[in-house]
Image (spheres, rainbow, N blue to C red):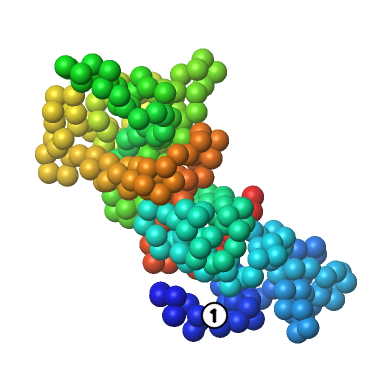
């Protein structure tokens, strides 16, 4: 959808409100105070408000959403979401500031809230059949060739970068990714963390493709994994990147490439505090494709 298409679809704020009501409520507004459906009246004088004649409360149709307390024009909100979702590598606060004519502070806050809403999708036991799992390392200082002759600068494990665990389901191309924060012993990435991620999103009897990182050893341990997950290894250390037709982790590695290019090229630096929100952004865009806009309005705009 181009800018002109957007303006035709949403010429006024009233058009935005009507679209939101249709997508989010299917034109049936529920009172957040008493749960009534049949006695809620949408006001004509103030389109954002509804009256409930069951409990005599007045409430905003945006109650509990990222729009509720915002004074920013709703068309700007919708266009910001449209730009955000249709930019493969994301959009910076400075670019959004220029595009919709708000201050940088407002643009940064809007993007932060949109990312936060993207993390509301429930992925519990969502994956089955075949998945790939891998870890990526984000942030830290640029690599330095501290050994000019042999070039022994570290790239991932053993650096100060933050590990992110990612699982990709092959049949749907959906991705779930979680930042692996240090445990109580200060360890950044452990087998327990890897197991918890797989156990939360994968159904029993799922086939899991991994590289030869020792942390995946729990998948071969009958005590910790009593036949729940089937493990197939691709030995990267031996220069093996495919152990046969379809035996690889190329899918999740492609996702890491998009994530890293977005962070380095658009955002330049992301703190550990907000890294999960940025990871959620790329997962949401990957998982929902051309339907992202409506899905975010249906589910994601409600704050946790």
Residue at image coords 53%, 40%? 274
**Residue 278 at x, y percent in the picture:** 47, 45
Seen in the picture, residue 49 relative to 296 is either above or below; the reply is below
10 Å crowding of disc 1: few (<14), some (14-19), many (20+): some
Quadrant of residue 24 within the rendered picture:
bottom right
Number of residue marks: 1
Work out which quarter of the rendered image holds the N terminus and state it: bottom left
Q: Which residue is labeled 1 in the image?
A: 10
**Residue 62 at x, y percent in the picture:** 69, 66
**Residue 241 at x, y percent in the picture:** 16, 35
Question: Does residue 300 appear in the picture of this structure?
Answer: no
Horizontal relation, residue 12 to residue 168: left or right: right
Residue closest to the far right: 56
**Residue 54 at x, y percent in the picture:** 85, 73
Residue at image coords 63%, 78%? 13
Horizontal relation, residue 130 to residue 79: left or right: left
Seen in the picture, residue 201 relative to 2 is either above or below; the reply is above
Residue at image coords 47%, 58%? 95
Horizontal relation, residue 128 to residue 68: left or right: left
Residues 170 and 202: in front is 170
Residues 267 and 244: in front is 267
Residues 124 and 304: in front is 304
Residue at image coords 76%, 74%? 49
Residue at disc 1, secondary structure: loop
Residues 148 and 292: in front is 148
Question: Does residue 232 appear in the picture of this structure?
Answer: yes
């Amino acid at each position: 959808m181009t800018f002109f298409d957007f303006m035709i679809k949403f010429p006024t704020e009233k058009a935005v409100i009507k679209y939101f009501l249709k997508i989010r409520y299917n034109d049936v507004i529920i009172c957040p105070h008493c749960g009534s459906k049949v006695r809620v009246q949408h006001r004509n004088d103030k389109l954002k408000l509804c009256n409930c004649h069951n409990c005599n409360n007045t409430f905003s149709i945006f109650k509990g959403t990222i729009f509720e307390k915002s004074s920013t024009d709703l068309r700007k909100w919708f266009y910001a979401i449209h730009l955000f979702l249709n930019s493969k590598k994301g959009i910076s606060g400075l670019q959004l500031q220029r595009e919709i004519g708000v201050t940088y502070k407002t643009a940064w806050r809007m993007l932060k809230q949109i990312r936060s809403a993207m993390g509301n999708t429930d992925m519990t036991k969502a994956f089955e059949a075949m998945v790939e799992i891998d870890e990526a390392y984000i942030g830290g200082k640029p690599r330095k060739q501290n050994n000019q002759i042999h070039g022994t600068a570290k790239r991932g494990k053993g650096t100060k970068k933050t590990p992110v665990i990612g699982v990709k389901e092959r049949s749907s191309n959906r991705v779930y990714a979680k930042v692996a924060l240090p445990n109580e012993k200060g360890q950044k990435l452990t087998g327990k963390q890897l197991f918890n991620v797989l156990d939360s999103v994968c159904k029993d009897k799922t086939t899991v493709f991994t590289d030869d990182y020792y942390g995946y050893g729990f998948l071969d341990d009958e005590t910790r994994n009593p036949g729940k997950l089937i493990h197939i290894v691709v030995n990267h250390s031996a220069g093996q990147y495919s152990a046969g037709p379809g035996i690889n982790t190329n899918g999740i590695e492609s996702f890491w490439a998009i994530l890293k290019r977005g962070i380095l090229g658009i955002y330049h630096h992301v703190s550990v505090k907000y890294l999960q929100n940025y990871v959620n952004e790329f997962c949401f865009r990957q998982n929902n494709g051309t339907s992202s806009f409506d899905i975010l309005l249906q589910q994601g705009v409600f704050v946790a």
